[in-house]
Image: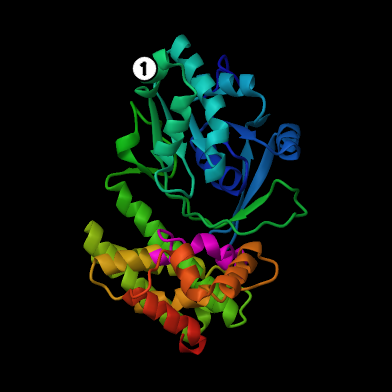
């Protein structure tokens, strides 16, 4: 695929679980060929060799979805990437927040070519688990554009952040080949309508939305928060899988309390419909119950230092609750359990335990979670940390 290609195509930066297991399906179902860009040479070679792969929908709606009309470019081949971007119908990134800076130069090269050849608008869907990821990618691209071209190129380029909610668990090499991805059927992709430039192509599953901040906050403080709750409480209770934790009546009561706290705060802050939010939670819990996904409590809980950050799914949710006069009682319990998560195979968990041992829990609450001494939330978390049987 290149600028001279007759068939419309998308450029997908990142051929991992989300890029290959979600976004490419939306492009494929919309009649677009897909050019992947990835740093993993074996993945690039295999995609080019096979020219197809399978997305396996598991659980309700189970089926195999063959993805054809694909090619791949190594991320170091800036010239080919630029050519691909210059002629693309749409572009998407799903590379991980830390890699946005890395892909920006090649995107900038492609936008320059596009500007000089056709000047047509281009929208980039930014599918990263990072607040303001669209603005961050735009900033990185801007720094890689000549000063004289910054304004005309950027005013013709949309950096539309997306909320990715399809669940894609840790993958195992399947007998059907290493490119196969196991996923759930859910395929809605809300994007920030205000960031779109020109006419957005009609892409299956893509939903431009107003009030994007509400969708972003709900993903973090409902979906991610609930997953973390199941992960930490389930792990401490000896459950291997998230669906097992969901079936545990004692843990389910805590999860329901957490979702009541965050839901009340989200409705107050963003004006969400209580009925619609209730339906959203019911749908989410039904998806969490999907046994075939095999999502482990360990995966849901791993990297507690990141998940305990001041603005992340637990402490951030508790702060939002406080801001809306909602007492984060159940959330404090979960934060306390997250601080006790210590599997040997999780480096982040081990670093956290080492810091608690050397610096003390109060200093860790301050430095990792942003919880100061004397705060009501700090006291609640300390109480939960000291009495883990209270959950």
> Does 313 appear in magenta?
yes
In this view, the residue farthest toward the top is 117
Q: Residue at x 41, y 41 (%)?
A: 161
Q: Between 348 and 93, which is closer to the camera in this rendering?
A: 348
In this view, the residue farthest toward the front is 359
Q: Between 372 and 111, which is closer to the camera in this rendering?
A: 372
Q: How many marks overall?
A: 1
User: Tag 1: Cα neighbours inside 10 Å, few (<14), some, or many (≥20)?
Assistant: few
Could you say where residue 177 lies in the image, as x and y percent from the top left?
75, 48
> Does 228 appear in magenta?
no
- Relative side of 178 to 147, left or right: right
Above or below, comparing residue 67 to residue 298 in the picture: above
Q: Quadrant of residue 341?
A: bottom right
Q: Which residues are magenta?
A: 292-315
Q: Is residue 312 visible?
A: yes
Could you say where residue 217 lies in the image, as x and y percent from the top left?
35, 56
Q: Is residue 119 visible?
A: no
Q: Between 340 and 50, which is closer to the camera in this rendering?
A: 340
Q: Residue at x 51, y 77 (%)?
A: 337
- Relative side of 48 to 202, left or right: right
- Relative side of 383 to 277, left or right: right
Tag 1 residue: 152
Q: Residue at x 40, y 34 (%)?
A: 159
Q: Between 112 and 162, which is closer to the camera in this rendering?
A: 112
Q: Quadrant of residue 16?
A: top right
Q: Secondary structure at mark 1?
A: helix
Image quadrant occupied by the N terminus: top right
In this view, the residue farthest toward the right is 175
Q: Residue at x 34, y 35 (%)?
A: 195
Above or below, comparing residue 306 to residue 336 in the picture: above
Q: Quadrant of residue 260?
A: bottom left
Could you say where residue 26 lies in the image, as x and y percent from the top left?
50, 41
């Amino acid at each position: 695929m290149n600028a001279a290609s007759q068939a419309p195509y998308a450029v997908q930066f990142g051929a991992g679980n989300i890029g290959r297991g979600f976004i490419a399906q939306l492009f494929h179902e919309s009649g677009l060929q897909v050019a992947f860009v990835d740093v993993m040479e074996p993945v690039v070679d295999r995609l080019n060799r096979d020219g197809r792969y399978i997305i396996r929908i598991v659980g309700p709606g189970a089926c195999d979805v063959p993805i054809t009309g694909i090619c791949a470019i190594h991320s170091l081949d800036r010239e080919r990437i630029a050519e691909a971007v210059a002629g693309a119908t749409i572009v998407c990134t799903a590379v991980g927040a830390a890699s946005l800076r890395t892909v920006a130069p090649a995107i900038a090269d492609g936008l320059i070519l596009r500007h000089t050849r056709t000047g047509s608008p281009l929208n980039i869907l930014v599918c990263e688990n990072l607040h303001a990821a669209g603005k961050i990618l735009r900033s990185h691209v801007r720094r890689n554009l000549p000063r004289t071209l910054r304004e005309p190129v950027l005013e013709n380029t949309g950096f539309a952040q997306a909320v990715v909610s399809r669940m894609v668990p840790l993958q195992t090499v399947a007998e059907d080949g290493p490119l196969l991805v196991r996923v759930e059927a859910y395929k809605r992709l809300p994007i920030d309508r205000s960031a779109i430039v020109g006419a957005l192509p009609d892409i299956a599953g893509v939903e431009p939305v107003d009030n994007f901040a509400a969708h972003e906050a709900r993903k973090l403080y409902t979906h991610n928060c609930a997953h973390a709750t199941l992960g930490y409480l389930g792990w401490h209770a000896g459950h291997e899988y998230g669906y097992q934790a969901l079936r545990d009546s004692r843990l389910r009561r805590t999860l329901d309390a957490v979702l009541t706290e965050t839901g009340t705060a989200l409705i107050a802050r963003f004006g969400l419909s209580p009925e619609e939010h209730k339906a959203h939670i019911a749908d989410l819990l039904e998806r969490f119950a999907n046994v075939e996904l095999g999502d482990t409590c360990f995966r849901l809980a791993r990297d507690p230092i990141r998940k305990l950050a001041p603005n992340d799914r637990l402490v951030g949710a508790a702060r939002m609750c406080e801001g809306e006069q909602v007492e984060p009682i159940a959330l404090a319990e979960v934060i306390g359990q997250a601080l006790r998560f210590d599997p040997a195979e999780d480096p982040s968990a081990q670093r956290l335990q080492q810091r608690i041992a050397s610096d003390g829990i109060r200093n860790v609450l301050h430095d990792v979670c942003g919880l100061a001494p004397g705060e009501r939330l700090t006291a609640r978390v300390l109480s939960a940390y000291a009495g883990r049987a209270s959950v």
